[in-house]
Image (cartoon, rainbow, N blue to C red):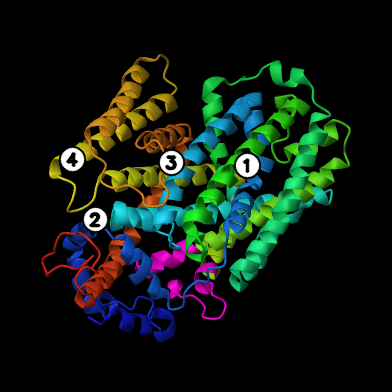
Amino acid sequence: MAADGEVRRRGCCGGGAFFPEESFASWGAYGRALMETGPRLRDRVTARSADAVELHEVRVRSGADMKRTLTWWDLIWFGVGAVIGAGIFVLTGQEAKEAAGPAVVLSYAVSGVSAMLSVFCYTEFAIEIPVAGGSFAYLRVELGDFMAFIAAGNILLEYCIGGAAVARSWTSYFATLLNHHPNDFRIHAASLSDDYSRLDPVAVAVIVLICLLAVLSTKGSSRFNYVLSILHLAVILFIIAAGLSRARLSNLTADFAPFGAHGVFAASAVLFFAYIGFDAVSTMAEETKNPARDIPVGLVGAMAVTTALYCVLALTLCLMQPYYEIDADAPFTVAFTATGMDWAKYIVAFGALKGMTTVLLVSAVGQARYLTHIARTHMVPPCLAQVHPKLGTPVNATVVMLAATAVIALFTDLGILSNLLSISTLFIFMLVAVALLVRRYYVSGETTNADRNKLAACLAVITAASVVTAAYWGLSADGWAAYAATVPAWFAATLYLQLRVPMARTPEKWGVPLVPWLPSASIFINIFLLGSIDGKSFMRFGIWTAALLAYYFFFGLHASYDTAKALAAEAAAGKVEEGGSKPADGGAGN
């Protein structure tokens, strides 16, 4: 087997082989690899990477380094730009009208709390492991290769769907700005299903332009982003001030929660879409000058500002109109027209377009860095890991991700996109919270078997209690009997973890406060919100996960196994990735 440097030289783009690993050298080699799927899978399920491996050995597989040019100022504006976009300007109207009523304000608050808990978890990891892989790298270190791959597939789905949803919303507000209906700019393909029949070439054109900007320069993208974000915040402040001047308290108090608590949480699960994007900031840790200082300020500061603005904007909308008169597609523009401020709709549409543009830009930057790090492990073709030596950006990964986003944006309706996106994101955030507890309470070779088993039992009870609570809520069951058992079980497991399992690791620079309570609460809330999403979205999620597993068993497993084996063959003592059982053929280093 060639060393990793030779594998890179043979890489799929330069040498013509899409998968340059030993298992794909010939049909015979591939057949032998498939026959060893069982032992190879056991090896990869138990394989865990190490911080140093992700920071050094994996990163160098990109050839050139990414440029460290970002500060906390850049990260705050990337965070604000990543999050405030289509969610607030589109989904607020949809969920206020159809799911929560004026209580959509509470829905935003619940989603914001969940997102902030996830921000804390991401921040600790981003400081300790400042690489482009974000949650994929964190999960590879703490939960192993296999779980990291499942998360990776959902991360990529999250970004493609999120970008597509925002791009289609961009078309809607662009049409409003020109006094047209959004479908005037879409092509109707009558032969396709209703959910996929409105083709959106404007969305595709916007994605192509964003791709060009993201490829050229990260720092240039940052400057463009914070200029647009500042203008966007000015428009938001105008919406709040002008909207409150047309406020009627009776619109809020007449029927505050017409759909009850179930409506509030159902809306909260969908509105989590509005907070998606902050994880893209964690992928920029590799390009940040001082991660320990800049990442906490950037991530936590951006999320605090965003949550406050969302709640105030939702409150403003519900004060302007009765919830049943709110327009589901362009709520703020229609609300201003209905209250006699027709001219204001152009400012709203202009601000929405700027906001969505920054969301698309940050998403493009973040998703390319995720794919770059995944490709460094050879779970996807390694040509996607290449960083351009002059531009300092991952050109191949950027183009591939945005091409996939453009295809989805061309066909798919926003309603389908937002629900499926929320499932993938909540699932990933839950896994990151689990990984943080594993990181704090388990260190291989140091934690005793008894303490390891206690940790596993606590995590099992925390997860099971959260799942049962979510399922009971999602099935609309009456009564409180199940909650009387599940919530105390979650509390007892978290308390036992705090009191009876010794913490194995303390962060050197910055750590999540109130461990294990905050990560445990993040697990509970994320799973609970999953219980409020419709069944069809879970079916689509299941289909996607099945497709991921098929790819992994036929391609990703063997490529990553060969890469780990090559590393094990050439690495000096102490530089091999940690863990993993040995398969029948002698085993691979992990």
Image mark for residue 305 = 1
Secondary structure under badge 3? helix
Image mark for residue 78 = none
The residue nearer to you, when weighing 540 against 504, is 504
Which mark is nearer the camera, 3 or 1?
1
Q: Residue at position x 17%, y 67% from top?
A: 35
Percent x, y for residue 139? 35, 53
Which mark is nearer the camera, 3 or 4?
4
State which region is magenta. 369-398
Percent x, y for residue 73? 62, 56
Secondary structure under badge 4? helix
Residue 548 painted magenta: no
Q: Are marks 1 and 2 in contact (CB under 8 Å)?
A: no
Q: Residue at position x 78%, y 47% from top?
A: 349
Amino acid of disc 2: Val
Which mark is nearer the camera, 4 or 2?
4
Amino acid of disc 4: Asp
Which mark is nearer the camera, 3 or 2?
2
Mark positioned earlier in the residue sequence (3 or 1): 1
Q: CA distance from mark 4 to mark 2?
A: 21 Å
Q: Residue at position x 19%, y 68% from top?
A: 588
Percent x, y for residue 89? 69, 42
Picture layout, residue 54 above or below residue 482: below
Image mark for residue 538 = 3
